Amino acid sequence: MKKGLFITFEGADGCGKTTQLKLAAEYLQEKGQSVLITREPGAKGLGEKLRDILLNYDGIVSDRCESFLFLADRAQHIDTIVLPAVDAGKIVLCDRHIDSTAAYQGYGRGQDLDQINSLNMIATNNRKPDLTIVFDIDADTSMQRVGEQKDRMESAGIEFFNRVRDGYLKIAQKEPDRVKVLDASKSIDEIHQDVIKLINSLLRVF
Ligand code: TMP
């Protein structure tokens, strides 16, 4: 049986990826594709509890603990939600995945990147996304869009978000076949057209 596809949407907070994911899902559903929308951290069940800790816990969270909590959520998500759906032939659109941990915990927090990459591969059983779209915006715009009400991660400051953005661009340079960068300062519709082009070129070779 033909398997499905796994596409991830990435970028700094406020980059517009969630809006674009929903538009892409509508587009694919109109084309008759079977689509699953999901996210990390916290798709459902145990993941939702981990998300609450990761975004709202107000005590001390060590950087290594933070990485492991995101990775724990990922292992549960890939095993119980993503891979079963891909195996059933669905197109899975996922809001954040392995590259968030590399960008935020690796480049942002300064955790060892080789270790993060190895742990990511353990958490996912070595299954990388078929396509990853990075929505690129500068850190000032990112912070402006997030606004005053910030969660634990969003409170990390402008320097942190500069490193996160830089990290995403480096990841894309290292894996140009899988990771594509779009200019997220364009209009919602222009970005949507860019997303559709990327997804359609993947569907053609699928
Ligand atoms: P979001 O759902 O609004 O994108 O928020 C999730 C937050 O968690 C966001 O600030 C990015 C952060 N995050 C990491 O730091 N590492 C990860 O591995 C993931 C999946 C998210």
Image (spheres, grey):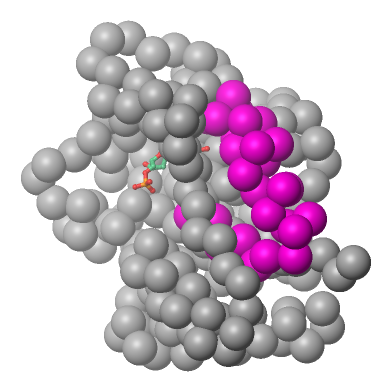
Q: In which quarter of the image is the C terminus?
A: bottom right
Which x, y percent locates residue 155? Answer: 24, 34
In front here: 111 or 60? 60
Image quarter for ligand 1: top left
Q: Is residue 174 visible?
A: no
Residue lying furthest top: 60
Which residue lies at the image location 49% right of the left edge and 74% below the top edge?
25
Against 167, is 203 above or below?
A: below
Which residue lies at the image location 50% right of the left edge and 52% below the top edge?
38
Q: In this view, does 185 lie to the left or right of 68?
A: left
Image mark count:
0
Q: Does residue 3 belong to the magenta stretch?
A: no
Q: In which quarter of the image is the N terminus?
A: bottom right
Q: Can residue 55 be seen in this view?
A: yes
Against 116, is 203 above or below?
A: below
- Span of residues in magenta: 70-95
